[in-house]
Each structure stands twice: as C-alpha cells, then as structure tokens.
Amino acid sequence: MQIYLVGGAVRDSLLGREVKENDWVIVGATPEQMIELGFKPVGKDFPVFLHPKTNEEYALARTERKQGRGYKGFVFHTGIDVTLEEDLKRRDLTINAIAQDDDGNIIDPYNGQKDLKNKIFRHVSKAFIEDPLRVIRVARFAAKLPEFNLHPDTLHMMQEISASNEIEALEPQRVWKEIARALNEEVPSRFFEYLELCDALKILFPELEEVEIAIKRLAYAASLGLRPEVLWAALLYHTDSYHIKLIDQRLNTPKKYHEIAYLSHESCPIWANIENNNAEEYLQWLKMVDAFRRPERFKILLEVCKYCEECNGILKAEKCDEVYESANQITAEPFVKQGLKGLEIGKAIDKARIEAISKIL
C-alpha cells in the first residue's frame, strides 16, 4: 500500500500558495483493508474514506470509462492493480495531475510542473472531453489563477463539450457549487469570461442579458471587495426579475443570493435617481426593501448599490446608510408612553422618521 498527496494541495504548494485542504490517493489497497485500518467509507460513486484521526479524504487509485451522459456517466475501476500514473491520467489538467510521496518526492508523469512554470491550463489526456463538468472547473481555475492562460487545444475540447449538449446533463447543484466557489476566487469575472469563450455561458445562463456589460460590472464589484452574494447580484443587474427567478430556480440558488439579486433589480431604478427623492420617498424605499425589520440584509443591499459606478454608487450608499441610521433611531416606545395605540403608533413613527430624514437631506 502506498499513499500519495495529490491534486490541488501539490499544485498550490508548488505555486507557493496556501494549501487549504489535502487530498490523498492510495495505491495497492482494497476497501476491506481500509476499513480494517479504521478508515470510514463515504464514497457513493467510488471508494473514498475518511482518515480516523484527521478526517481527510483518502481515495483508492482508480481508472474510469465513459458509458453515459453527464458528470456521473462513468464506470470506475479501483483494483489493487491500478497504478498512480493511471489514476493521475484521468484528471482534468496537468497542473492537477501531480503527486507527492511521503518523502516529499514529486511524481509528475504529465509535465504539470512545466505548465505551472509557463502558467498554462492544459488537459492531461483526450479523456478530458468525456466529462462536461471540466468546462466549469477549468473556468473556476481561471478565476483562481488569473495569471494562467488556456492552451488552444484545451479550449477546442471545451468548445466541443459545449457543442455536444453534455453540459445540460449536469446536476444543477453541482453547477452551483462551482459558481459559488468561483465567486470566492481572486478574479470571479474570469469564470464567466471563460464560460463565454468556450460557448458554455449561453447554455448555463440563457437568460443572462447584456453579457459583456454584466461581466464588466461583476469585475468592478469584485474590485471593491464585495461579498459573493453581491457579486451574483452584479452579474444579474441587467436581467429582469422574471429571468432572475428562472436562473435561481434552475440552479437552486441559496436564498441569500436570490433575495439580494431580486431586490437589487427591483430597487435599482429608484436607487439611480435617489438623490432626487424627498424624505417621504426615502422612507417608502426603506420600507419596500424591509430595511427596519431586516437590517443585515439591507446593509448587503447597500453594498449592491456601491457597484453602480456610473451613478457614483459609493457616495450614494453612504448617504442611504446615513438616512437609514437616522430613521432607525425612531422606535415605538415613546409613542406608546404617550398613550397612542394601533395605527396611530405607526403613523407617528412614520412622521418622526420623515422629520429625521429631512434633517439629513
């Protein structure tokens, strides 16, 4: 039995980047032997085990054969005869097909170190074209490693995958997982640029409007250091509410992403001209976005407004925050003490908030 560190951990270590998680491959072992050693089996499609102490994933070396559509259309073989080189050959990119043994020796049968040095994304073998998920993964690596470029032959394979309709067979949850990870990478906009480059964006996001402008807006929002759900809203800024809903339903987007994207679209027409609003209109906008009951979400919505570069969004966001803080100081307590009840309290709060906002304006 031999154990090797593989994939992203080796790649990032060679690049001098922080290694966030380790992946291990075991050559020459059976599932029964792994269980006897105390490893816990967790893999559904192929044998993966959790280390009894570190809880890190250890996978048996495997080969694969394509027999169906999509990401799961493979048959795996994990016999003790499978070599490390055979296991590495089934991986996507050469830079992810490097291993390291217990003594720190690097095993690199597909010249991944050369591609690391030259900053190139290159497929390991022709089997690359069999897995449609690799289109999305390579796009995410483009966001993670923005200084790297795509080898022309690999781009051609990605375009072939897009033309095959295999991407449509991917599970939405798996697609969203890659999107969410890309939104947390160094240059998220490159993820969508690469999908556009290989003709996959129109398959994954047929509803996305003004693609070039949408990607540029996302890039600007990312340059401000805004959070992932705000970047998602930036991408969908020019997409109408109906199509935002279709995208989110198809990808099963988490609620916090959907809410911010939807709210930003609904409130941005108001936002664009908000400097012309009077105190009453400001208060109505704050109510529309439920700012007083959901202050945390409102703060995120203000971040959305910051990426509106053409309308001086950062200054407007600061002004709206000041208006909100002033209005939010008004509570029901003093009016209850005055003996007001029911609707009278609400009217009194609104009046006091309008006065407070007027002072700010």
Image (spheres, rainbow, N blue to C red):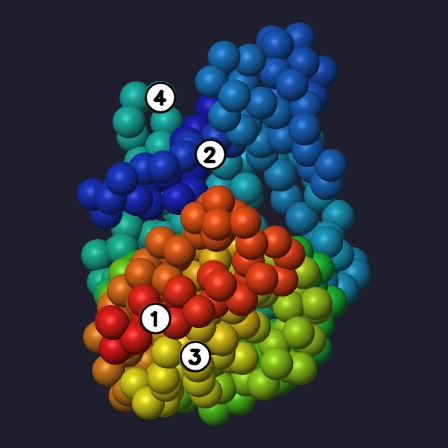
The secondary element bearing badge 2 is classed as strand
Q: Are marks 4 and 1 in contact (CB under 8 Å)?
A: no
In this orientation, which residue lies closer to the viewer: 51 or 330?
330
- Mark 2 → mark 1, Cα distance in angstroms: 60 Å
Secondary element type, mark 3: helix
Q: CA distance from mark 3 to mark 1?
A: 9 Å
Mark 4 element type: loop
The mark that comes first in sequence, 4 or 1, is: 4
Q: CA distance from mark 2 to mark 4?
A: 13 Å
Q: Which disc number belongs to residue 102?
A: 4
Tag on residue 280?
3
Q: Earlier in the sequence, mark 2 or mark 3?
A: 2
Rendered view: 101 above or below 71: above
Residue under the image location 56 percent in, 54 percent down: 340
| In front: label 3 or label 4 | 3
In the depicted structure, whether residue 5 falls above or below residue 148: above
Amino acid bearing label 1: Glu
Instruction: Between label 2 and label 3, give the one nearer the viewer.
Output: 3
Q: Residues within 10 Å of mark 1 (few under 14, many from 20)?
A: some
Which residue is situated farthest in the right direction here? 68
